[in-house]
Amino acid sequence: MNNKVVPRVLLAVVLATLGPAAGAAQYLVIGSGGPEYTTPQETVEALEEELLPTFDALMKLEAAKKIVGGGMPVGDRSFAFILEAASNDEADRLLRDLPAWGLLKWDIKPLQSFQARAEKERSIVDTLMKKVTEPAPDPVPAQTPPAPAAAPAPMPPNPPAQLAPLTPPPPPAAPAQVEAAIAL
C-alpha cells in the first residue's frame, strides 16, 4: 500500500468525526500532483500566481467553515481536507474556484457520518439476528410421486397346437367302485 494513502485515510477518519453542519454534506478532498518546473523562474511564477493564492483561498474557506479540517501531509505536494457543502454543485463550484484547480489532480469522495453508517449496520445486524434466532419453518414433506404400476408379467408364448392341454384325469375311484369294476 502506498505510504501516502494511509495518512490521508487516517486524516479523513479524524476529520469526519467533527460531523457536518446541519444540511451539509462532507467531502474528503485530496489535490495532488501538479506540473514539474524546470527553472527557478517558473517555480517562482507558479508559487506567486497559483499556489500562494490557493493557500489564501483555502484559508478563507476554512474561516467560513466550508473546510472543517485538513492541511498538507508533511513533505508531500498535496492538499487534504474535509469540505462541507450543501450540494454536489456547491462542492464543485468551491473547488473549481481554487487558483490551483487546473494544476492538480483532484480526488473527491463524499463522506458518510459515523452515526449514519452505524445505524445502517445495526439495521443489518437486526435483520440477520431475526433470521438466525427464529426457528426454521417445518419443512413441507415432498410429495413423492406414486410408484409406477408394476408391469404385467410377460405372457408365455402360445403353445403349439399339437401340445394342447390335456383334460384333467378323473378323480381316483373309491375302493368300492374298484371292486365293482373288477367284478364286471
Image: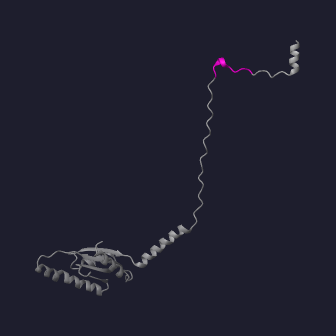
Horizontal placement of 4 versus 151: left or right? left
Residue 183 makes an appearance in the image:
yes
- Look at 11% across and 80% down and name the residue there: 40
Position of the N terminus, as image quadrant, is bottom left
x, y (%) of residue 76? Answer: 23, 79
Closest to the observer: 93 or 127?
127
The quarter in which the C terminus is drawn is top right
Q: In the image, what residue occupies the spot 26% across and 78% down? A: 95
Residue 34 on image: x %, y %: 20, 75
Front residue of 74 and 64? 74
Q: Vertically, is 126 above or below 75?
A: above
| Residue 86 showing in the rendered view | no
Residue at position x 62%, y 27% from top?
156
Task: Kindly report the secondary structure that dominates the magenta region of the rendered protein.
Answer: loop
Residue 37 position by quadrant: bottom left
Q: In which quadrant of the rendered view does residue 146 lie?
A: top right
Colour scheme in the image? Answer: one colour
**Residue 174 position in % (x across, y down):** 86, 22
Is 139 left, or right, of 75 in this rendering? right
The quadrant in which residue 20 appears is bottom left
Is 160 colored magenta in this rendering?
yes
Q: Residue at x 22, y 82 (%)?
A: 54
Q: Outermost residue toward the bottom?
A: 63
Q: In this picture, which residue range is highlighted in magenta?
A: 159-167
